[in-house]
Amino acid sequence: MLWGYSPAQDMLGLLMETNSKKVEKRGTVKILLAGCSDPRHILMTLAKYYTHNVEVTIHFYVAEVLIDFIARQLLLLILALEPSLKVPLCQKTYLWMELFGNALIRPKSVEYLLEKSEQLIHVITDPEYNVFRLPCVDLTDLKYKERDKLEAIFRYWTRNEFNVSQHWDTRLRKKLGTRYDSKNGAFEWDYFMKMKDKHKPLLVNSNEYNQWRKNGVAFVWLETEYSMSNPTFAMGVHVVGDQLEEFGYFGDMDIGPYYTFATNCEDANMLETNHHTNLHRGTDIFCRNLTRCFYEIEHGKPYIHEGDQRTLGQIVLKVNELDMNPKPRLEADTPKTKETYSSIPLKHKIHLLNTKSIKNLPTKSKFKNFFDAAFISQSMEKLLMESDHHKDFFSMMTDGGVVVWETRKAYLDISKEGLQSFEDAVKSMMRDNNCQPVGSQSFNVDFVVKFKMVKSPEGPS
């Protein structure tokens, strides 16, 4: 999966709610993000840091099992941390949303992707440039082989030869079978009988969802052309002789990227309805939340939206049918020289760990009783249950630390037995590792559930 199935969390805020003394006592807060696929929790935590009135330094440790996800995280981070003098706020938000969730993107977005791919090659191959251009991101834990794979992925992006439309349609045909010719009806059924039933209120409208299911374009704005493949959707990029090839697209085709930033909004007017129909699309709510996030990261103060917001909730914005022969690769004169400016200055640090870290970290004495907070993706359940690996994994948590599990609430095609099995597995792991439930524990209602680690007999400090 290229994105998570739960809203962005302010991890520092969750830790303070669960155990405020822990934050007051420490000069640093160490947060583990296991299998999240995207940097949403990093961005939300950085954005809300100014609201907590504490002087701690946050260290994020990002653990992924696929190098493809690390490559995307690097791209999304370098874009999110662009100074507004280089990439204006509105442009940054649109770019981020497209590269994050659209299979087809604008030629202008491809130009930016080509430029940043060249810069990311410099970042991973030149440690000095890494410290200058992206100083808050630490890549020292990556193996040399993984750096080579990252370089191959970034070079593949610059070639822009991925035919995402063909891959999307092939998988869609296989998935729907005889229902392919009536796919619009199948998508409508999934939306109204599955999504709307599970998520109330659902801020994504049926037009947005149907379009994404059909062609992989999640976010659409007026007067824009989505005509070029997004090569960051390619999975399994590898070297074959002198060529770079991919295995295809194996990401989500059922749920969509909306849950990361489009489940709620601080601005009440964005949630208004008319005759039980949302006046604003999930795209607009996602955009507002992400804009606020980027602004607060850079300026450390509340974002106040100015101007009117178009009410497009009842308007159908269409993208052309899938073109199996999309436009040829963009022949842009991409500068390969190193950029001479740095990202937004931050005192916090983001450590991108190697792809074996989830299994190997617990074997290192440095990481015993190390993390103050952890967010664990629902996709990690099987890996942690394997050979009781969870016992070693949770030994890395400090006494009183908070553990946040993503649930499978967003899943469409999962049985009640499947949901119950996941819930039982998570609760069993938490009991075995002395983690106490915090707040609501409804795996069918909540996107996340929280626990607190209790190691000392007298309770957490």
Image: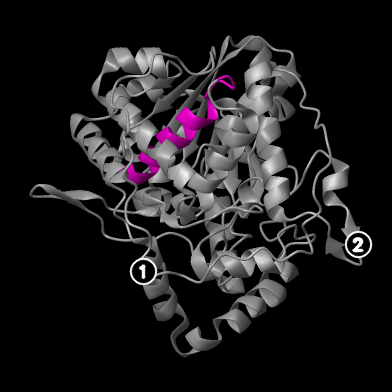
Crowdedness of circle 1 by 10 Å Cα count: few (<14), some, many (20+)? some
The reply to whether residue 11 is visible in this rendering is: no
Q: Amino acid at mark 2?
A: Asn
Q: Is residue 109 left or right of residue 260?
A: left
Please, what is the three-letter code of the amino acid marked with disc 1? Answer: Gln
Residue plotted at (79% across, 54% down): 280
Q: Is residue 298 above or below residue 218?
A: above
Q: Which residue is mark 2?
A: 274
Residue 288: x and y, percent? 72, 40
Q: Is residue 111 above or below residue 22?
A: below
Mark 2 in CB contact with mark 1 (< 8 angstroms): no
- Residue 334's place in the image compared with 412, above or below, is above
Nearer the observer, 196 or 151: 151
Q: Quadrant of the N terminus?
A: bottom left
> What residue is rendered at 62% in x and 55% in y?
220
Residue 312 point in image, percent of width and height: 77, 57
Q: Most extreme residue toward the left, as rendered?
A: 241
Residue at the extreme right: 275
- Quick check: is 82 in the magenta stretch? yes
User: Horizontal placement of 268 versus 164: left or right?
Assistant: right
Q: Secondary structure at mark 2?
A: strand
> Which span is picked out in magenta?
67-85
Q: Which of the 4 image quadrants contains residue 13? A: top right
For the residues labelled 2 and 1, the Cα–Cα distance comes to 38 Å
Q: Position of residue 158 (x, y in %)?
A: 30, 41
| Disc 1: which residue | 166
